[in-house]
Amino acid sequence: MSDSKISRRQFTIASSAFLLSPSLAFSKNQDFPTVRVNKAQRKFSDGLVEKTIERIKAKCADKEIAWLFENCFPNTLDTTVFHSQKDGVFDTFVITGDIHAMWLRDSTAQVWPYLEISKDSKPLQDLILGVINRQAACIIIDPYANAFNEKPEKSEWYSDHTDMKPELHERKWEIDSLCYHVRLSYNFWKKIGRKEQFNDQWLKSAKLIVDTFIEQQRLTSKGPYRFGRTTSWSTDTVPGNGYGNHTKPNGMIHSTFRPSDDATQYPFLVPSNLFAVKSLEQLAEIAIEIYKDISFSQKCTTLAKQVQKAIQQFAIVKHPEFGSIYAMEVDGFGNALFQDDANVPNLLGLPYLGVLKATDPLYINTRRFVLSSKNPYYFKGKVAEGIGSPHTLVNQIWPMSLIMRAMTSQSDAEILQQLKFLKNTHANTGFMHESFDKDDASKFTRKWFAWANTLFGELILKIEKERPHLLKQVL
C-alpha cells in the first residue's frame, strides 16, 4: 500500500513499549480499553454510524470482534476526512491515515462501507458526494497520478523523474486509481439514487479516464507517461527508461504500478485490466442514461470489449498443478507472473469488485493457486497464514488479504478461520495494520491504516447481512 519514505521500507514496527502501554494492554477477562478517538477529536460524526456500531455489538457473541468493529468501522470518519461545502458544492479530502495525502483508490475504499448504510443519512451521503467531487477534480489535474495533496505544495516525491505538479503527492500510474473513482460514482447513483455528481466536471474526468486507458494500450506509441525515482528500492522505480519492461501490445492496458504502489514486472496487470472492463461498462451506462451521450457510451463499450478479448487471449494461462488460471501479470510475449498480492484489485478479490462470480470455475482454480504455497507471497506462520506483498518483502501477512479471503469465501469454516486470525493478530491495538510478521504479530507495519480498518468493518456488516449465525460464535 501507499506509504511515506520511512514507513514504506523501514517499516513502522510496533515497539514493546507501545504494545504494553496501560491504555492498550488488557486481559481477556477485563473490559476492553477505549482506543477509539474521543468524540471531541473526531473529524466527522454521524448518528447512523453510531447506531450501526451498537447494533453489531449487541449481535456479536465474541466481544473482542465487537470491540474491533467499534474501533475499525468508524476509523475513516473519526480520523481521516476533511469535509466542507463551498457555494453548494461538497468537497471531501480523505487521507490514508499516517500519510497526509489522498489516494484515489484508498479514498473510495475507505468510504465504501458507509455507502452501503447511508440511505438514511443525508450528511453521510453528502460526505461521499464530496469524495466523488474531489476525485473528479484530481483526475482533471492529472489522470496518471495516484495520490494528491490537500492543496498545492511540493510533496516529498516532487523530485521524481516524471511530470510532477504541486497538487500531486505521487505520480504512479495505476489503472485501478481511475477504476475506483468510477466504482464510487456509479454505485452512489445505483445504491442511493443521487445523480448530482454527474456534472460537467465529472464528465470531463470520465473522458480523461477513457482517453488515458486508450493511451496506455500503447497500440501506436508508448504514450506520454514515464516515471523514475532516485532510490535503492527496485520496485519504487521503473525499468525500460521509465516505461516499464518491454511488451507486445495486444489490447490490454499497461499499468506501470500495482495497487501496492510497486512497479509491475510485466505491465499488463491482469486484475486491474479486469477491473477496467467493469468500469468501462459502468461508464457506458452512465454516458447513455445520464448524459444521453451515445458516442461516448459506444467508445466505452468498444474499449471494454477490446480489453476483455485481449484478457481472454493473453491473461489466462495453464498452471501445471491448478489448470487454467488468471496470471497476475503478462507481457504479450507469452511470459506470465504466477503470483498474487494482498492489495485490491488482486486475483483473490475479483468477485468482491463484481468482476466475476465466486463460483466461476476459472476463479476457483485461480483462488486455489493464490491460497497455496505455489504463490510465492502466501505465507504460513505461527500466528496466521495469508497473502502478503513484495511491498513489505517476505513473511509479512496483510490483514487485508485475510479480510478479502473471508469476503470472497463460500464457506462458514473458512470465514470463521479468517476472523480468528484477525482477532489474534491485531497485537492488542484494536486496529488492523498493513502487515504483520507471520510468526509474531507484534511486529507490524502501519498502526494507522484506515483502508484496512474500514474494510474489516465492511466484512462484519457483510457477515451480518449474509451469514448472521456466524456472529453468534465466540472464536
Image: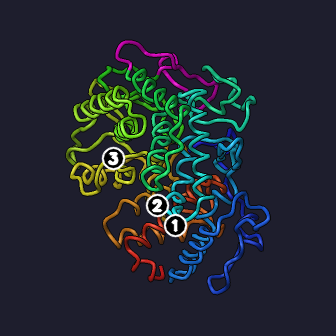
Residue 459 on image: x %, y %: 47, 64
State the residue position of label 2: 403
- Marks 3 and 1, the one that precedes in the sequence: 3
Query: Which mark lies nearer to you, 2 or 3?
Result: 3
Question: Magenta part of the protein: which range?
Answer: 218-243
Instruction: Give the image quarter of residue 463.
Output: bottom left
Mark 3 or mark 2, which is nearer the start of the sequence? 3
Q: Mark 2 Cα within 10 Å, few/some/many (few <14, many 20+)?
A: many
Spatial CA span between label 2 and label 3 = 18 Å
- Lower position in the chain sequence, tag 1 or tag 2: 2
The three-letter code of the residue at mark 1 reads: Leu
Q: What number is the disc on residue 255?
A: none
Q: Is residue 227 magenta?
A: yes
Q: CA distance from mark 3 to mark 1?
A: 26 Å
Residue 365 drawn at (x, y percent)? 25, 51
Q: Give yes or no for contact between labels 1 and 2 (Cβ–Cβ under 8 Å).
A: yes
Work out which residue is located at the far bottom of the displayed protein and give it.
29
Q: How is the image coloured?
A: rainbow
Q: Which mark is residue 422?
A: 1
Look at the image and tell me whether residue 439 can be seen.
yes
Residue 278, image x, y percentages: 35, 41
According to the picture, the residue beneath numbered tag 3 turns out to be 355
Q: Nearer the viewer, residue 436 or 183?
A: 183
Q: Quadrant of residue 158?
A: top right
Q: Secondary structure at mark 2?
A: helix
Mark 2 and mark 3 residues within 8 Å of each other at the beta carbon: no
Would you say the magenta stretch is mainly helix, strand or loop? Answer: loop
Q: Residue at x 44, y 53 (%)?
A: 387
Q: CA distance from mark 1 to mark 2?
A: 8 Å
Q: As drawn, is 291 to the left or to the right of 33?
A: left
